[in-house]
Image: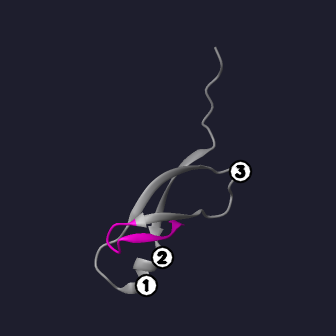
Amino acid sequence: MAKKSKGNRIQVILECTEHKTSGMPGMSRYITVKNKKNTTERMELRKYNPLLKKVTVHKEIK
């Protein structure tokens, strides 16, 4: 059997940047995983924001 390593995949939280600047209550966040060796910089994905009812840019937060 193969050895199990700790792995390079980590869980990250993506938060809507457009909603943050609007000042509206609530927050759109998504949880995803990334490989920390291949993707060293912070992730940016276009995801759906149900509060604004449109697709916006979501950035990784720490």
Count of marks overlaid on the render: 3
Give 21 or 12, whichever is nearer the viewer. Answer: 21
Q: Which residue is drawn at 33% across and 67% down?
A: 50
For disc 2, the marked residue is: 17
Give 48 or 37, whichever is nearer the viewer. Answer: 48
Return the x and y of residue 7 as percentages of the image width and height.
Answer: 62, 38
For disc 1, the marked residue is: 21
Under mark 3, the amino acid is: Asn
Which of discs 3 and 2 lies nearer the camera? The answer is 2
- Range covered by the magenta-colored residues: 49-62
**Residue 44 found in image quarter:** bottom right
Under mark 2, the amino acid is: Thr
Viewer can see residue 57: yes
> Earlier along the polypeptide chain: callout 3 or callout 2?
2
Return the x and y of residue 46 as percentages of the image width and height.
Answer: 52, 65
Mark 1 packing: few (<14 Cα in 10 Å), some, or many (20+)?
A: few
Q: Going by the image, does 6 lie left or right of 28?
A: right
For disc 3, the marked residue is: 38
Measured Cα–Cα span from mark 2 to mark 1: 7 Å
Q: Quadrant of the N terminus?
A: top right
Q: Does the magenta stretch include residue 54?
A: yes
**Residue 22 found in image quarter:** bottom left
Q: Going by the image, does 44 lie left or right of 19?
A: right
Return the x and y of residue 21 as percentages of the image width and height.
Answer: 43, 84
